[in-house]
Image: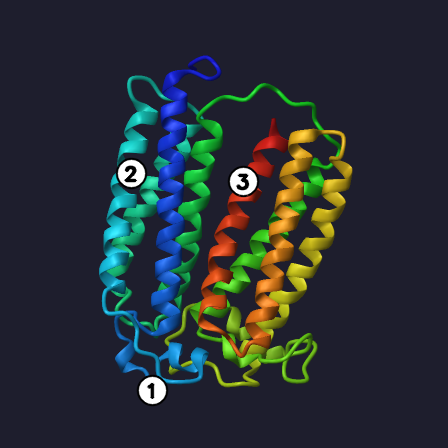
Amino acid sequence: MPPFGSARGRRIRALAILTCLLSVLVVTVSATLRLSGAGLGCADWPGCYGAILAGVPHAPWEGARLVHRIVATLALLAGILLAWRCWRPQPLQPAARYATLLLALMLFLSILGVWSADPRMALVNFLNLVGGLGLVTFSWRVAITAEPSQMLERGGGGRLCRVALVLLTLTVVLGALVGARYAAVGCSTLPDCQGVWWPAPHGFLALNPFVRLAGPAAPGDAGAAALHLLHRYAAVLAVLLFAVVALRLRKVSRARNAALAVLTLLILESGIGVLTVVSGFSLWLGVAHNVGAALLLAAAASLMHSVRQ
């Protein structure tokens, strides 16, 4: 492994940060396409999802799909170069492993695009959503592991931190299911969901992504209510757990700062989610909520890295 602060490590880190920024842009444009109704196949719907979010018929920017393809292509080229730089002339671990996973995910999403023309396939929607978040996470992991850090003093929140990270991942997955099933407008009240505080037994069927959708979820839909309530409760528990984790890591500066970053982003993300509902599902707040999830997972990767050292 090259010495700490090597020129190769700095170049790989810079390239990884560039790839991460391109990945964030891919997530942003993808969310805009999906939520505005500019995605392929939108004309087949009874009404575009974007029209429901905005409350009026929405005319998306015609160049949005072209921008998405250009940015995605640039991200793929950066990912290929990043993997090459991490493996040659000798592997730079663990950055090379993360760069390989990043490239594999990019290629998988490229192939998945063949089925993305039909927005009624919930599983394809879900994989696209989660995959976009994974692009940001893996590229950021390359960035934080490209230059080996000095060993840090361990804190006392390792196990609890892992539980909090699992809960955070569950929160994001539930949010992705809300988007994949076009269920955002199915729950337009806070903190309850159209008068419901706990999912109905048959509402848990919405956790199954292997369905072909007939259209966006209507307000009061049991499945939409289940996804929203589970997503909200998981987010509240995650905030509480990360607050405890930050407190337990208070004597380990880098881990504590990473935990505080996750906690801050999680609170901001929750606030954006609340504003999205209160605003009547503003299109741009919905996009911001998607981008916030990607940044949140990147911060979580930094926390995991610092705690494991």
**For this view, does 275 lie left or right of residue 26?**
right
- Residue for point 64% across, 66% down: 232
Q: Identify the mark nearer the N-term, 3 or 1.
A: 1
Question: Which residue does the numbered mark 2 point to in the structure image?
Answer: 78
Q: Residues within 10 Å of mark 2 (few under 14, many from 20)?
A: many
Task: Pinpoint residue 60: horizontal percent, then vertical percent.
Answer: 30, 73
Question: Is 66 located above or below residue 150 in the figure?
Answer: below
Q: Identify the mark nearer the N-term, 1 or 2.
A: 1
Q: Residue furthest top?
A: 3
Instruction: Identify which amino acid the numbered label 1 is placed on.
Output: Pro
Q: Provide the secondary structure element on which disc 2 rests.
A: helix
Query: Quadrant where the C terminus lies?
Result: top right
- Marks 3, 2: nearer the viewer: 2
Question: Which residue does the numbered mark 3 point to in the structure image?
Answer: 301
Q: Residue 95 appears in which quarter of the rendering?
A: top left
Q: Identify the mark nearer the N-term, 3 or 2.
A: 2
Task: Pinpoint residue 239: horizontal percent, then vertical percent.
Answer: 69, 54
Question: Is 305 located above or below residue 286 in the figure?
Answer: above
Q: Do we see residue 296 in this rendering?
A: yes
**For this view, does 180 lie left or right of residue 70?**
right
Using the numbered discs, state the Cα–Cα distance from disc 3 to disc 1 in whole angstroms: 40 Å
- Residue for point 46% across, 17% down: 5
- Residue for point 49% across, 73% down: 282
Query: Quadrant where the N terminus lies?
Result: top left
Q: Provide the secondary structure element on which disc 1 rests.
A: loop
**For this view, does 146 lie left or right of residue 58?**
right
Considering depth in this image, is 159 or 19 the residue closer to the camera? 19
- Marks 1, 2: nearer the viewer: 2
